[in-house]
Amino acid sequence: MLKSWKLKEVVLMSLFSVVFGIVYLLFLHVGNIWAGFIGPIAYEWIFGIWFIVSIICMYIIRKPGAAVVSETIAAAIEVLLGNAVGPRLILAGLIQGLGAEAAFAATGYKRFNVWVLMLAGIGAAVFSFVYGYLLGGFAVFSTGYVVLMLAIRIVSGAMIAGVGGKMVVDGLLATGSLRGYAITRSVKGDARA
Amino acid sequence: MPVPEVIKFEDVCFRYPDEDKWILDKVSLSIKLGEKVVITGPSGSGKTTLLYVCNRLYPDNCDGIMTGSVKLFGRESSSYAQGEVNHRVATVFQDPDAQFCMLTVEEELAFTLENLDVDRSVMAEKIDDVLTMTGLIEFRHAVIQQLSGGEKQRIATACALIMEPDVLLLDEPISHLDPYTARKFIAWLDELQNQKGFTVVAIEHRLDLWGTFFDRTIELQKMDQVPLLEKRKSSRQVEQSLLVQDVSTPYLKRTSFHLLKGEVAVLAGPNGSGKSTLLKALCQLIPAKGSVVPEQLGYVPQSPEFLFVTKSVEDEVAFGGGADVQDMLERLYLKRVAEAHPFAVSHGQKRRVAIAAMLCDGREVILMDEPTSGQDAAGLFELLQLIDERARNGATFVIVTHDMEFAYAIADSVLLMDQGELTGKFEAERVWANEGLLLAHHLLQPKGCVDNEVSYA
Amino acid sequence: MKSAMHEMNPSVKFILVTVCMFTLAFFFDPWTPFFVWVGVLLIQVLFSRIEWKRWLLFMIPFFIMAFGYFWTTIVFAEDRSGAVVWTLWNYPVTEVQLHHALSLSFRVLAFSGLSLLFALTTKPVSFILSLMQQMKLSPKIAYSILVGYQFLPVLKEEFVQIQQAHRLRGASKENNVVMRLWNMRKILLPMLAGAVRKSERAAFAMEAKGFTGEKRKHFYYVVGVGKVDGLMGLLFVILLVASCTSSIWIG
Ligand SMILES: Nc1ncnc2c1ncn2[C@@H]1O[C@H](COP(=O)(O)OP(=O)(O)OP(=O)(O)O)[C@@H](O)[C@H]1O
Ligand SMILES: Nc1ncnc2c1ncn2[C@@H]1O[C@H](COP(=O)(O)OP(=O)(O)OP(=O)(O)O)[C@@H](O)[C@H]1O
Ligand SMILES: [Mg+2]
Ligand SMILES: [Mg+2]
């Protein structure tokens, strides 16, 4: 998998991870404090933000593995920045990335419209929820509460990560700085077709 | 035994994916082991692009379209893996900010050695050697991002040399060096080349400093004949225009000076003496004490990309709402790339875009950080005319340059800097005549000045 | 002795901390996470030079979060069996509910204690180097992360610079806070565009220096595994075993 990647694509993922690592950290602090008042459900609304890097990178690079690797790197960078959720976060990142990756893999890495991106957001939401269920000990909560959490997380994943991620990249594409990446190639291809 | 060819192009055509124009059009050339070759051509003619094909960064990394055959060390270039051929071909890039990936100088050098599978036990020694040889030992633990433009360029050369390459590619290696350092650089490059016999392929606009270094010149495109730079007449008026009082930063010692309306001052001094720092402090881009009148200054940074805010060269120049944008594009040879993205043009073009944008903005005081670096003769000539015109209309200029001929032609007065301190403001004539002063600031006497003296005698 | 945690191999430390966390995930009594937390604090006191002020600053959000878990677990608990131990505004709290609430809150504290112990005693660069040298992380990814990490201060600077470039070019400075926030969107895109360009240059620079992404044989900075790793590892295992069996010896 790594062999087929250009170095500039991997470094791109890393630099995006830094930018979003900072954003993630900011949201984590907001989320933590909010969670003190309304409990773990506080994160669910904004959970989508933590999947955004995987969707952005995959949307740009369009190669198998882009979602998993970018999300994992973002988590690693968050840890390097001194995040108190710590090492466990790298695993969380890996699992979220796998969730998003699953959606792209299901479409054969061929289609990247808004629906697929939303599906990737949902995939990340479901995968991360299962992981959170085990490690966060959600089992002690009543079923209704757990279902509500999951539902909100799915919506957040689809909207913030899927739709939001697409908006960010489309804005970036318009600045012309994504020349030489798969997304520009495909846009041109679409225009010709 | 015949000398082997290290680089061979046969009918190579190359274009960027979005452009229709072929940047390289049927280029054929062959470079033998141990040759010293210089590539010349006007700004934007594809010199840098050619170099990127030689070190195999292109066409892979930009989706460029290439036809013809490129052989490196007798093997088709496309048969090398990413980075493989770079074990034998070292490159010094044009832009001082685009050369590095590690934090400190030592780490950067170590990274290079690791890539080459050098045994750990000799790494430290090799790093020591190359830094001593290039006179950079004091920078061993320096953070690269914090060095001056010229210092970065020298570090980049050290990084290339530590590889002990078979081929050394240099993209305008002395354009950010002060004249004295540039001379030294050429001298030891010559010595080193004699010792080791590697091939040198350099891009250069101005060959006078190089003396007899190169064996042969490859002209990528004919240069237009332009008249030599002529010394302009002073346009100083009586009113004061720029007043600088007690400006200082942690590096910069207290600086005060003033310039008159229509005055063109050249700011010169050794690499790392604080010229860029001073300009940035004047525009309040870095926190600084002291006062500057007027507050709104025009500024062309040493790395022009920093200024760009729009999507096309034309919009960029028109951004300040100035008139005669078309005229400006025409004169600075930017018409051809008017539609292009400002980041996707050549280095010299980028610099001219930044200059054009500032000249169109109608600011009264304009600071330019090395506007001459990377410009061809035609560009320099036009730049001189433009500055002269603006100065006659009352604009004031501070121009940082290492180009002594240009400085001689343009300056009314000279601001000299050394080790973070402004040593003084002098009348231009007095500086050119004073060899001691020139040498103390790593400057050389301009040729124009010498010629004049001869004709007087 | 105070430097033992700092001297440990980052990968070994990483594995220990992760193992502790995963083991904790299977315990639903309050004592196990509580003892782990206390043990971690003890290790921190004895074997590290962490500044407590800094530690506290990082810990505050997690104290708040632990409290959030505490009360939501009580209110939204699935299992409401057991004797009522406590009544809050006519709301009966059973033994089981309290048990669960405490166990989740202590879990939060134990997790964050462990993480902070790791984060505050590990140099980021050594961690990546160690992942590459001990854990066989691909150099392509490892060096890309290092490059990204080193661009952090540059990106911070760039954030200011973009604002300044806009100002230099004549965009006015906004005094209204809401408008300023709204104008941030004009900064995010240039930041990302800048990141794209920087990554390209950095990649070119790496490749031009002969970086192929292959596994490397020699490293300039070697991050090793030593005796201290074994000793500290043993300590962590003892702590974990003691905590996990606590329900047995406490009764
Ligand atoms: N990334 C790019 N995408 C599209 N076009 C480009 C790109 N880089 C350069 N160009 C165009 O290709 C042409 C050649 O550029 P190149 O950088 O090779 O010129 P150069 O001869 O090195 O000029 P200079 O002396 O100014 O550095 C220019 O006209 C430029 O506009
Ligand atoms: N951000 C920074 N932090 C610390 N030191 C710095 C920083 N920027 C520059 N310096 C130091 O200040 C000195 C002056 O740098 P400056 O860029 O002003 O030099 P310069 O005169 O423009 O040189 P050049 O001709 O090479 O461009 C250098 O020695 C540099 O190492
Ligand atoms: Mg060039
Ligand atoms: Mg400078």
Image (cartoon, coloured by chain):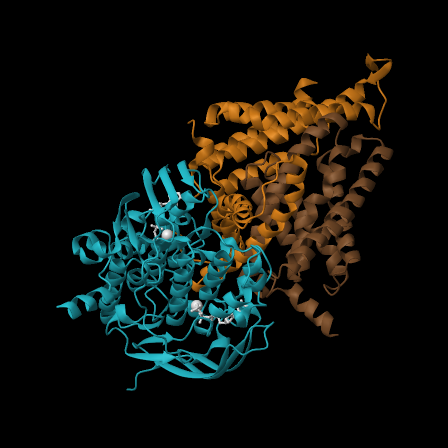
Chain colours: A brown, B cyan, C orange
Give how far across and how far down residue A27 sits, in percent.
Answer: 66, 37
Give how far across and how far down residue B258 sits, in percent.
Answer: 34, 44
| Relative depth, front residue between B18 and C102 | B18
Check the image and report above or below for A27 versus A69: above
Find the residue positioned furthest to the left: B457
Check the image and report above or below for A136 versus B303: above
Quadrant in the picture for the N terminus of chain C: top left
Relative side of B262 to B418, left or right: right
Check the image and report above or below for B292 versus B30: above
User: What residue do we see at 73% from left, 40% from top?
Assistant: A46
Check the image and report above or below for B2 versus B173: below
Find the residue positioned furthest to the front: B238
Relative side of C21 to C1, left or right: right
Relative side of B300 to C193, left or right: left
User: What residue do we see at 59% from left, 77% from top?
Assistant: B20
Quadrant in the picture for the C terminus of chain C: top right
Quadrant containing ligand 3 reads: bottom left
Give how far across and how far down residue B128 sits, in percent.
Answer: 28, 53
| Relative depth, front residue between B179 and C3 | B179
User: What residue do we see at 62% from left, 53% from top?
Assistant: A69
Quadrant hosting residue B385: bottom left
| Relative depth, front residue between A67 and A164 | A164
Give how far across and how far down residue C112 sits, in percent.
Answer: 61, 30
